[in-house]
Amino acid sequence: MFLAAVMGFVGVGLGAFGAHGLRGRLSPEMLAVFETGVRYHMYHTLAILMTAALVTRVDGRALPAAGWCFTAGIFLFSGSLYALAITGVTTLGVVTPLGGLAFLAGWACLAIAAF
């Protein structure tokens, strides 16, 4: 739950930074990339919060694994989009699919935990 709170705090802060600090400094395309990072960051922050709320009710390792996969996805997917948008270094986009795979793995682990 602490991790979800920190991720939510950071996500809101980055969203505000993108909306107020980066507008006019980034092209509309790169601002959209940054906003995509924030959107997925916040979606998966809620997923981490959900896994934290359920972890005492569901046995097994799948639910904690889901939470860690969501966390890795935020760092890899959203983090690479933040870095790409701010720096313009397109090679950072190579990391983004790994974050997407981490998100998918998190949702798969959540499905396994539910089953």
Image: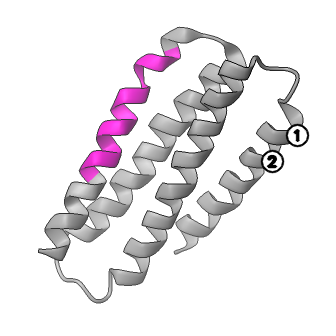
Amino acid type at mark 2: Ala
Q: Please say whether residue 96 is one of the residues in the magenta stretch.
A: yes
Residue 35 in the image, given as x and y percentages of width and height? 65, 38
Regarding mark 2 in the picture, which secondary structure is present there? helix
Whether 98 is drawn above or below 60: the answer is above
Q: Name the residue under label 1.
A: 20
Task: Name the side, left or right, on which 71 lies relative to 114.
Answer: right
Q: Which of 109 and 40 is in front in this view?
A: 40
Categorize mark 1 by other alpha carbons within 10 Å: few (<14), some (14-19), many (20+).
few
Query: Which stretch is magenta?
Result: 92-105
Whether 87 is drawn above or below 74: the answer is above
Q: Residue at x 54, y 65 (%)?
A: 3
Q: Please say whether residue 71 is one of the residues in the magenta stretch.
A: no
Categorize mark 2 by other alpha carbons within 10 Å: few (<14), some (14-19), many (20+).
few
Regarding mark 1 in the picture, which secondary structure is present there? helix
Q: Nearer the viewer, residue 59 or 114?
A: 114
Label at residue 96: none
Amino acid type at mark 1: His
- Contact between marks 2 and 1 (CB within 8 A): the answer is yes
Q: Outermost residue toward the bottom? A: 57
Q: Residue at x 88, y 40 (%)?
A: 20
Q: Residue at x 29, y 55 (%)?
A: 106
Q: Which residue is drawn at 41% across and 46% down?
A: 72
Q: Name the residue under label 2.
A: 16
Residue 113 in the image, given as x and y percentages of width and height? 18, 72
